[in-house]
Image: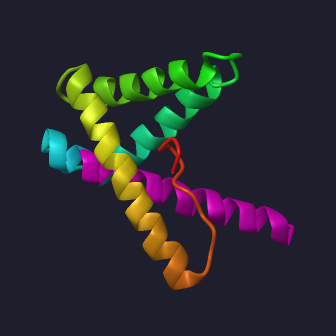
Amino acid sequence: MPVPFVGALVTFVVSALVGGLAIYVGARVVADVDDYGRAVVTALLGALGWAVVSWLPLIGPVVALIVWIGVLKWRYPGGWGTAAVMGFVAWIAALVILFVVNAAFGVGIGAFGVPGA
């Protein structure tokens, strides 16, 4: 296995786990759901939904955000408002987690499955 592939795979896994942790925080705070595995799957599904529609000209990012919030709504209890607040909390959590991880380890990872983080 070539080294760049291993590095990309490790980056993807760490980014997915960070995105899942951020969604876990949002789900725990807003929906009182305590399931990290569910959050990681939600991050992967949210990223897939984002990728499918974000390419649309002009409206892509807005539609993609609605799709991402829709994935949160589908995977967790509550309505659109709950999902939107959960997404906002997850976004804040992702920024904090990424700041700490990137500062502590000198890396430049992102949070897969959390838009804008």
- Residue under the image location 51 percent in, 51 percent down: 117
Q: Is residue 62 magenta?
A: no
Number of numbered discs overlaid on the protein picture: 0
Q: Is residue 94 left or right of residue 77?
A: right
Q: Along the line of sight, which residue is nearer the eye, 112 or 34? A: 112
- Seen as rendered, the residue at the extreme left is 32
The residue stretch that appears in magenta: 1-26
State the scheme by which the image is colored. rainbow
- Residue under the image location 24 percent in, 44 percent down: 27
Asked if residue 74 shows in the view, the reply is yes
- Residue under the image location 17 percent in, 49 percent down: 29
- Residue under the image location 33 percent in, 41 percent down: 88
From the viewer's perspective, is residue 54 above or below residue 24?
A: above
Q: Is residue 48 left or right of residue 20?
A: right
Can you give x and y, in whole percent of width and height, for residue 95 in the image? Answer: 43, 59
- Seen as rendered, the residue at the extreme front is 58
In what quadrant of the picture does the N terminus appear?
A: bottom right
Can you give x and y, in whole percent of width and height, for residue 102 in the image? Answer: 54, 74
From the viewer's perspective, is residue 79 above or below residue 48?
A: above
From the viewer's perspective, is residue 58 above or below residue 99?
A: above
Query: Taken as a whole, is the magenta stretch helix, strand or loop?
Result: helix
Instruction: Locate residue 38: give its quadrant.
Output: top left
Q: Is residue 20 magenta?
A: yes
Can you give x and y, in whole percent of width and height, for residue 69 in the image? Answer: 38, 27
Asked if residue 33 shows in the view, the reply is no
